Amino acid sequence: MLVSSSTASGSRSRIKLGMWLLLAPLCLWLLLLIILPHIELLSFSLSDPDEGGLTLSFYGEFFNEPLYWRTFLRTAIMSILATALTLVIAFPVAFFIAKMIKGRSKGILFAMCLIPFWVSELVRTFGWMILLRESGVISSGLQWLGLADSGVELLYTDATIMLGLVYSAMLFMVVPLVSTLDSLDDSYIEAGYDLGGNNWNIMREIIIPHATPGIVSGCIIVFMLSLGNYLTPVLLGGKDSLWFTEQIYTQFITRFNWEQGSAFGILLLLLSSLIVWLGLKVTGQSFTKTMG
Amino acid sequence: MKKLTVLSAAIALSLSVSAQAAEELRLLTWGGYAPQEVVDLFEQETGIKVKVTKSNNEEMISKLKATRGAGFDLAQPSQDRITSAQKAHNIYKPLDLSKIDSSQFIQSMLAATKDQSTLGGDVYAVPHVWGSSGLIVNKADAADIQDYTDLCKPAYAGKVTYRLKRPTLIGFAFAMGEDPFAAYADKDKYQQIMEKVGQKLTDCKANVKAYWSGGDAMLNLMRSGETTAAMAWDAGGWKLNKDNADINFVAPKSGALGWIDTFVLPRKTKNEEAAYKWINFVMQPNIAAMITESAGNFTASKGSDAYVDAKLKAQYQASFSPADIDNIKWYPPVPAGLEKIEGKILDRVKAY
Amino acid sequence: MQTDAIDLACENICKHFSEFTAVDNVSFTIPQGSFFSILGPSGCGKTTLLRMLAGFESPTSGDILIKNKSVLDVPPNKRPINMVFQHLALFPTMNIEQNIGYGLRRQGVAKAEIAERVAAVLKRVGLPDSGKKRVDQLSGGQRQRIALARCLVLNPTLLLLDEPLGALDLKLREQMKIELKQLQKEFGTTFVYITHDQSEALVMSDQIAVMNQGKFEQVGTPHELYYQPKTAFVASFVGDTNRWSGVVKSSVNQEDHQTQYQVTTNDGLTLDCVSQSSDIPVSSNVDVFVRPEAITVSLSAMDNCLENQLECQVENILFDGAKSQIIAIDKQSGGCITAAMPQTADFMGLKAGDAVYLSFSAKQALSFSEKQGEMNASL
């Protein structure tokens, strides 16, 4: 009795040790690359470089200077719009991949969604610039066809930023959507038709509710990616397109104002989390359900 | 005991051997300032490998600030970014002038740089490459652009590009009849000037096709004809001039803005000797001419003109009359705190 | 069965998938209110046939008539037909009420009426309080009833069921068979039930169609299929049976339209048997089928009037209560025969190795010529 119980507890502690060993890389990664830098950011954002001690003035600056919170608002709204647009475009694509085709062509179509990601974001963005600039491919094409008299500038507008954001976020929406739609048995859709449903309300009442976890997780990823994007808005954006990450970069690199940059970084984290939380509340989803 | 000494000797030996084999100079510099051929010649002569990191003023200072002066053996910030950055962040190390062959420098320039970069009796920098920023104009389309403010003429709506960086603010301030350098010491006055310039830039927005950020983007805009005038460096103008004779650098009426990029030692430099060797090596007239060739700008090396390509000299003379050279506004050291004022103005211009 | 009205008629339905023929020229009619089963092994085409009725596939040729109107051009969501899917397909994102109300909402029924009808149907299937529950809170049998209720609430002309009991465990399946039959009677809806399980079909159906390789082998009542199979396939697929292959030695016509044959089996037995067809020529190949329960078991040789008697040795006893069986080896041929265990005291002590005598009448030994089998199949 005694012997068996001691070996049992021994093996249990061994299991525990094994679990910790397995978790160690994850914990280290979290600690070194996520938690520590954020603690550093937080302490920077609260420290007063002139007087020493703590100060909230860098956070105050964000709320008092309309420039900053307007930039954030603009960034957030554009990101939400980009997310919605990505969803609208990605859903039919994902539905087509998951439900309409089978076998080899499915793999090929999926790979085609992946291809843009084989080159770096910078190259992709320069690709757009070559296509869209006044002396670029599309503009020349339009002139050659006689549809335009002079060069057409398609670059440097908010629409161009949107295009770039949607393009680079597409895959991150398609993948979770395909996996949730794949898990929807065809018989549910057939049952919908059988009971008198038409395309529209089967989509609304059966397919979309089933795909909600995929939609929500895709939206969270795309929203965060858009909000945190730097290259696309800076290179494709117009004269009025200030992006919040650009603000953070400027504060750190050109202003040497690390305290302000840190405060902006922390605010970006908090406010984007708040927006995601609100989004989950509004759609009645819970984070664990979505990710689980 | 004996074993131990043998062992430690072996370790010491292997360390010194590896140090010898891996002797390298980590150079933080601008694009074009350390062309491959110069790096190769230097390695042939000294056996030292040069690891080049290309950067710009803000990034150089940010990098050194992040590591408190470590990670590089020699850096090349502009002359106006030395004493202020040193005061604020303590990232540089004073130079030992006895190790630099001062006879290779244009004396007036060396004296000016030493004077501008002296802090607490220590000299922190010697000059290397100098140049100016002003206007690049396509004369076929915009012959009447002579000053920064001419970029805002209604005729050039959508045909103009410049950066949203401090040289633009300073240039416009001079063109609007102000003297921002004189106001460096007076923050309120400087703030006033900047507000005025910000307003002007906001009004001028309709004329701007795009704010360029990388030099190549600006060159593309000018080369493709998408813009007819830009605010940029002289070397960029001369580069464009090679392909299209209509485009050239124009020294603005209110004065081109002169800058000098220098040599400084980061505070935690690991290979000071190699740094001095590099400085003395690249200041030789024939080597300096090679750098002029690759960077497009002239150096502070005495007598290197003789080695420089005739075409570049001709372009230089076409852009600068003797009066224009006298009119160059050299950047004085930037006092701390001005960047914040300028930054906010620039953000506003972009936002509204 | 109360009236002679025909709910569903299929006329010469064919379905080809490129090279493969899934349904081959099938015709049948189903009277109103009856429980009609299609029984066949997997891959026989019964699911394809059902999906054509539901409208998810369209026949390559032939016509489907509901209440004498062709529905070929009617999409599945407009047909007066509903279907209970193999895995039920209850919508997991809706609760029970919403599931049952789905079809009514599609018909634009008023909210109050929906609630009323949903409550009523829940009561009829015996789950009056589960409207607010989630699908995963119900047991397998309860889900079954909800799936039925979801269809029945729409009062369909025809209800299709695609092996809905397949996922249930044995005990529950037995219970659901009876419940399904009862619900069908109560609602009076015409059921078309497909299954590969002959016991499900036999217990519940009014009419059964036995399907094989895209064709109907025989359509009839469970009783007819069991006792008067028309083809070798039906005889072997419906119910347990012993089977011998052999050659006809001689034939004698009986007075009751049956012909009695003497057959020598391939393993050397001589059996007397009957056939419904009178034209099996001497020396043609036939299969003989005898059901285990048609065999009389005795411990000593009987000199009664049964035509066939075999002396055997008990090989094994498969004990299953009232359904216990004896596996015996025939001494003459060494072949294996299964017989039902008599439930009398004489056989309580029977064990492997004991000698038994198995006898059966010629009338219970049905023979089918191979040619006849083909003929029937193409009928």
Image (cartoon, coloured by chain):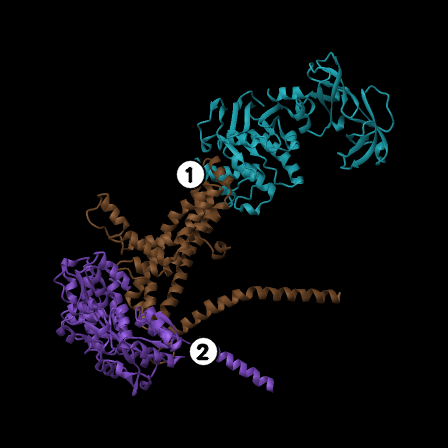
Residue situated in front as seen by the camera: B219 or B239 = B239
Mark 2 falls within which chain? Answer: B
Which residue is located at x 28 percent, y 60 percent? A241
Under circle 2, the secondary element is helix
Front disc: 1 or 2: 2
Residue A196 percent location from the top left of the image: 46, 35
Label 1 is placed on what type of residue? Asn
Mark 1 falls within which chain? Answer: A
Q: Quadrant of the C terminus of chain B?
A: bottom left
- Quick one: which chain is purple? B
Q: CA distance from mark 1 to mark 2?
A: 75 Å
Residue A175 percent location from the top left of the image: 45, 51
Q: In the picture shown, does residue A74 fall above or below C172?
A: below
Q: In the picture shown, does residue C220 fall above or below A191?
A: above
Mark 1, residue position:
A199
Q: Colour of chain C?
A: cyan
- Left or right, residue C331 beside residue B149: right
Residue situated in front as seen by the camera: B172 or B105 = B105
Label 2 is placed on what type of residue? Gln
- Quick one: which chain is brown? A
Residue situated in front as seen by the camera: B197 or B226 = B226
Residue A68 percent location from the top left of the image: 30, 65
Locate residue B250: give its quadrant: bottom left
Under circle 1, the secondary element is helix
- Left or right, residue C302 beside residue A134: right
Locate residue B304: give its quadrant: bottom left
Residue situated in front as seen by the camera: A227 or C378 = C378
Mark 2, residue position:
B20
Q: Quadrant of the N terminus of chain B?
A: bottom right
Binning the other alpha carbons within 10 Å of mark 1 as few (below 14), some (14 to 19) or many (20 upward) gives few
Outermost residue to the right? C300
- Check whether the beta carbons of the residues at disc 1 and disc 2 lie within 8 A of each other: no
